[in-house]
Image (cartoon, rainbow, N blue to C red):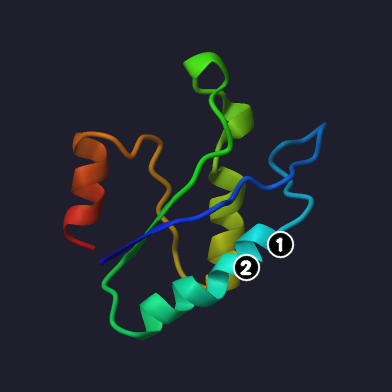
Amino acid sequence: RVFIRVDFNVPQDKKDPSIITNTARIDAALPTIKYALDNGAKSVVLCSHLGRPNGQKSEKYSMKPVAKVLEERLCKPVTLLHDGVGAGGEGAGANP
């Protein structure tokens, strides 16, 4: 398994935050992600965030649009964890 901290703080459409207006940061990470997958990684765990104003979760800052672009670019399923801390995060990475 490989853990990669990525900067997916991507610009989103102001009216529809589910639309990413520039995928350059995602595209820049693809060679590293593909390298790990092509060289034997059972799984690649990517860690990023868009924001959490005042410590509160907000759908506006969801990583769903990023996961969708990653799936399209990698031609592989991407599992999005809504909270990577605790049992949910540990369980997801335990047996890919």
SS at badge 1: helix
Q: In the rendered view, does 33 fall on the left or right side of 42?
A: right
- State the image coordinates of residue 12 (x, y, percent, origin top left): 74, 42
Residue that label 2 marks:
28
Q: In this view of the protein, which residue sits in the foreground, 16 or 83?
A: 83
Instruction: Tell which of 8 and 74 is nearer to you.
Output: 8
The answer to whether 36 is drawn above or below residue 91 in the figure is below
Residue 49 against residue 28 in the figure, above or below: above
**Which residue position is annotated with label 1?**
24
61 left or right, relative to 11 = left
Q: Is residue 80 above or below residue 31?
A: above
- The N terminus lies in which quarter of the figure? bottom left
Q: Residue at x 34, y 85 (%)?
A: 39
Task: Please report the residue visible at 30 percent of the width from the left and 67 percent of the height from the top.
Answer: 43
Label 1 near label 2: C-beta < 8 Å? Answer: yes
Q: Residue at x 77, y 55 (%)?
A: 22
Residue 42 % position (x, y): 26, 72
Residue 67 position, x and y percent, is 53, 53
